[in-house]
Image: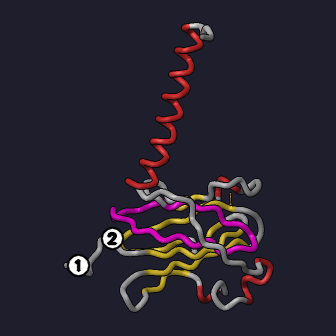
C-alpha cells in the first residue's frame, strides 16, 4: 500500500471537483443556453467581396424570407460593420451572414448568444433568435488594429408583431 500525504489527497479531490465543475458549466451553457461554436465552413474571396453578388454594397442589410425568418448580410472591415445600423424583429429566426474585407474581426451582441469570429476568406454564418426587444450594440471582439475599440454597429430589436 503506497502512502499518500493527506494534503496531496485533499488536492486530488479539489482538482477533480474543479474539472467536474468546469466541464459541467460548459455542458450546461451548451445545452441550456444553446451556446456552441458556429460550424459553418464556406470560403469566399475577401479581396473581391464588393464584386461578389451576396456581399456587394447594395445587397447588404436585413432581408425577410418567405417563411418570415430574417437574413442579415454584413461586411466587417477596419473599422466598422456595414451596414452600421440594422433592425430585426424579436422572437424570429435570424441568420447572420458576415464576411471580412481585411483581417480577423469578431462579432458579439451582448445579452444574446451571438458571438463569432469573422475570418478573411470565410463566410461566418450564425443562426439565432433574440427574445428581448431593445437597442443592442454589436461589437468587434477580436483585436483588429488601432481602431478596434471604435468598431461597432447598432442593432434595434423590434417587438414581434407577427404573433399578435
Ligand atoms: Cu474589428 Cu476589432
Residue at disc 2, CB closer than 8 Å to ligand 1? no
Question: Is residue 148 shown left or right of residue 134?
Answer: right
Return the residue nearer the eye: 51 or 30. Answer: 30
Indicate whether 90 appears above or below 24.
Answer: below
Does residue 119 show up magenta in the picture? yes
Q: Residue at x 64, y 62 (%)?
A: 117
Mark 1 sits on what residue? 163
Indicate whether 91 appears above or below 48.
Answer: above
Q: Quadrant of residue 69?
A: bottom left
**Callout 2: few (<14), some (14-19), or many (20+) C-alpha neighbours within 10 Å?**
many
Return the residue nearer the eye: 115 or 57. Answer: 115
- The local secondary structure at tag 2 comes to loop
Confirm or deny contact between disc 1 and disc 2 (CB under 8 A).
yes
Q: Quadrant of the C terminus?
A: bottom left
Picture coordinates of residue 151, whole percent (x, y): 64, 60
Q: Residue at x 74, y 57 (%)?
A: 144
Picture coordinates of residue 114, whole percent (x, y): 50, 61
As drawn, the residue found furthest toward the left would be 164
**Callout 1: few (<14), some (14-19), or many (20+) C-alpha neighbours within 10 Å?**
few
Indicate whether 120 appears above or below 13.
Answer: below
Mark 2 sits on what residue? 91
Q: Quadrant of residue 59?
A: bottom right
Question: Is residue 160 shown left or right of residue 64?
Answer: left
Mark 1–mark 2 Cα distance, whole angstroms, equals 10 Å
Does residue 82 show up magenta in the picture? no
Residue 106 seen in the current view: yes
What span is colored magenta in the figure? Answer: 114-137
Amino acid at each position: 500500500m503506497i502512502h499518500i500525504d493527506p494534503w496531496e489527497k485533499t488536492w486530488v479531490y479539489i482538482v477533480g471537483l474543479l474539472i467536474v465543475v468546469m466541464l459541467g458549466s460548459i455542458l450546461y451553457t451548451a445545452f441550456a443556453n444553446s451556446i456552441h461554436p458556429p460550424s459553418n465552413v464556406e470560403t469566399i474571396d475577401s479581396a473581391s467581396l464588393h464584386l461578389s453578388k451576396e456581399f456587394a454594397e447594395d445587397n447588404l442589410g436585413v432581408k425577410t424570407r418567405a417563411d418570415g425568418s430574417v437574413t442579415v448580410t454584413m461586411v466587417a472591415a477596419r473599422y466598422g460593420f456595414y451596414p452600421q445600423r440594422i433592425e430585426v424583429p424579436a422572437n424570429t429566426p435570424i441568420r447572420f451572414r458576415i464576411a471580412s474585407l481585411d483581417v480577423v474581426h469578431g462579432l458579439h451582441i451582448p445579452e444574446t448568444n451571438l458571438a463569432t469570429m469573422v475570418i478573411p476568406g470565410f463566410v461566418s454564418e450564425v443562426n439565432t433568435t433574440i427574445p428581448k426587444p431593445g437597442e443592442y450594440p454589436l461589437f468587434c471582439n477580436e483585436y483588429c488594429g488601432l481602431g478596434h475599440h471604435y468598431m461597432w454597429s447598432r442593432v434595434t430589436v423590434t417587438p414581434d408583431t407577427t404573433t399578435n
